[in-house]
Image: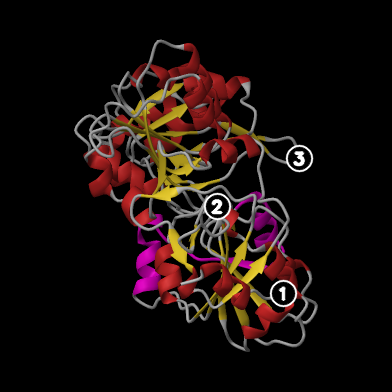
């Protein structure tokens, strides 16, 4: 078959392609870098014409035209997970969060919980066999496309070509329309590590040994850990992560990641979604040593436990004295989402030598200048509990590590108060006493 001729036959302008969207449809943009820039703008131009169109996405990296240019209120924007931009949309009542665990996301499409009338996703240019690579977003893309009634791909020449261990691509024969886009795939700058981030990273570094496999979240603390590892004697690390960021690129360049001793996918780094710098994207383009995989594989505790020496490091917002962890809301204000945090904590705790860490600064300062402790007596303001106390791992602040697995309530209270800011410790002790989780023999 002449795939180039079929390509020409299916190519459309963005305006022509979005005519396939009808009133009441569910339109899916997939997640992060799969966001279809040209199609989103064209669809936004139909505001006022269309009614009750629901759009699904996650981790918006660019302004979303169907959100920002919708005076006719034709569109409802829904998010599996939130970026900083998405938080602003939710705060303004322009978007809604959909709770989920990342490892279950694909099953929602397969089982019909997440219907898809029109899929609009960005892909890499077609190869000679007629395939479009998913590029930076494997995630639940395969399940999403299988569920979609209509598929429109937005071909972007700046999307790197990656190889998946299962799916990772779609064939032109399965595509209903093709739109070309010359806007660069969105990038994101890595947050700089603060002095507090470096102190937290220093507490974790001794638990990372040569040959371990790493899952790092995104932010200043993972970047600080990467810097410390690059300067250390640790070597032959593996990568198995839901999100690949520039912290991993630094470790690859420093020769610290070889994937040599991974018990699963030996010799290969594994990720499911990626966002970062252009340098990171160029590093991944046609790189046979780094593979993408669906979230149902990457985030499965069954997969993770087989990696044996597995270290999971993520961030959180607040912890109470029982070990309950909130990582996605401040009170009822949505900040991010559960994502894969509980997936990786579960898998790490089941791995033979696995460890999981949740990190945070001990305090934060509000807009009025008042300082608050992130270690709380108990949650009472509607905060979403991301990690239950029954699965609480080690909590890390700049004051040390509270290892919570296996500890009774009084032990947890003591360990957490020891890593709280000193100005709040007496207050937390009094609360623990009132809550009957403070031993009289504890040191005061």
Q: CA distance from mark 2 to mark 1?
A: 34 Å
Q: Is residue 293 above or below residue 120?
A: above
Q: Which residue is mark 2?
A: 336
Is 176 situated left or right of 21 in this image? left
Instruction: Answer with mark 1 or mark 3, whichever residue precedes in sequence.
Output: 1
Q: Which residue is mark 1?
A: 13
Is 379 situated left or right of 156 in this image? left
Residue appearing at x 36%, y 61% in the figure: 104
Q: Is residue 16 magenta?
A: no
Report the magenta residues as a range. Answer: 83-110
Q: Quadrant of the C terminus?
A: top left
Query: Which mark, by number, is residue 368?
Result: 3
| Residue toward you, 103 or 116 | 116
Contact? badges 2 and 3 (CB < 8 Å): no
Q: Is residue 220 above or below residue 40?
A: above
Residue appearing at x 78%, y 82% in the figure: 72
**Residue 306 x %, y %:** 21, 40
Contact? badges 1 and 3 (CB < 8 Å): no
């Amino acid at each position: 078959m002449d795939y180039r001729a079929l390509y020409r036959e299916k190519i459309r302008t963005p305006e022509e392609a979005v005519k396939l969207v009808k009133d009441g449809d569910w339109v899916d943009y997939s997640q992060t870098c799969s966001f279809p820039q040209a199609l989103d703008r064209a669809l936004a131009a139909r505001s006022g014409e269309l009614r009750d169109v629901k759009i699904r996405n996650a981790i918006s990296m660019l302004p979303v035209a169907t959100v920002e240019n919708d005076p006719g209120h034709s569109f409802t924007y829904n998010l599996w997970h939130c970026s900083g931009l998405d938080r602003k949309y939710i705060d303004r009542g322009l978007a809604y969060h959909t709770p989920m665990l990342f490892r279950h996301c694909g099953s929602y499409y397969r089982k019909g919980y997440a219907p898809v009338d029109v899929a609009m996703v960005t892909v890499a240019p077609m190869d000679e066999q007629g395939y479009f690579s998913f590029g930076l977003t494997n995630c639940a893309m395969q399940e999403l496309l299988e569920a979609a009634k209509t598929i429109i791909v937005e071909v972007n020449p700046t999307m790197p070509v990656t190889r998946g261990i299962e799916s990772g691509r779609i064939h032109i024969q399965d595509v209903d329309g093709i739109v070309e886009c010359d806007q660069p795939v969105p990038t994101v700058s890595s947050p700089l590590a603060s002095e507090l981030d470096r102190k937290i990273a220093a507490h974790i570094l001794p638990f990372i040994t040569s040959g371990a496999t790493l899952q790092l979240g995104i932010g200043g603390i993972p970047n600080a850990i990467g810097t410390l590892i690059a300067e250390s004697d640790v070597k032959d690390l593996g990568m198995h992560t839901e999100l690949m960021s520039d912290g991993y690129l630094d470790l690859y360049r420093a020769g610290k990641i070889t994937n040599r001793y991974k018990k699963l996918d030996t010799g290969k780094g594994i990720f499911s979604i990626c966002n970062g710098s252009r340098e990171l994207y160029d590093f991944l383009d046609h790189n046979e040593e780094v593979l993408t995989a669906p979230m149902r594989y990457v985030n499965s505790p069954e997969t993770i436990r087989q990696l044996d020496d597995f270290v999971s490091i993520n961030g959180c917002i607040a912890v109470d004295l029982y070990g309950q962890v909130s990582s996605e809301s401040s009170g009822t204000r949505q900040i991010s989402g559960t994502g894969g945090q509980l997936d990786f904590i579960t898998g790490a705790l089941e791995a033979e030598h696995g460890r999981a860490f949740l990190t945070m600064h001990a305090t934060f300062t509000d807009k009025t200048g008042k300082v608050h402790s992130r270690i709380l007596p108990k949650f009472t303001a509607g905060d979403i509990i991301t990690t239950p106390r029954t699965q609480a791992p080690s909590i890390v602040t700049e004051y040390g590590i509270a290892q919570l697995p296996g500890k009774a309530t009084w032990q947890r209270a003591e360990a957490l108060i020891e890593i709280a800011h000193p100005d709040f410790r007496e207050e937390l002790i009094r609360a623990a006493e009132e809550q009957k989780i403070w031993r009289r023999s504890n040191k005061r």
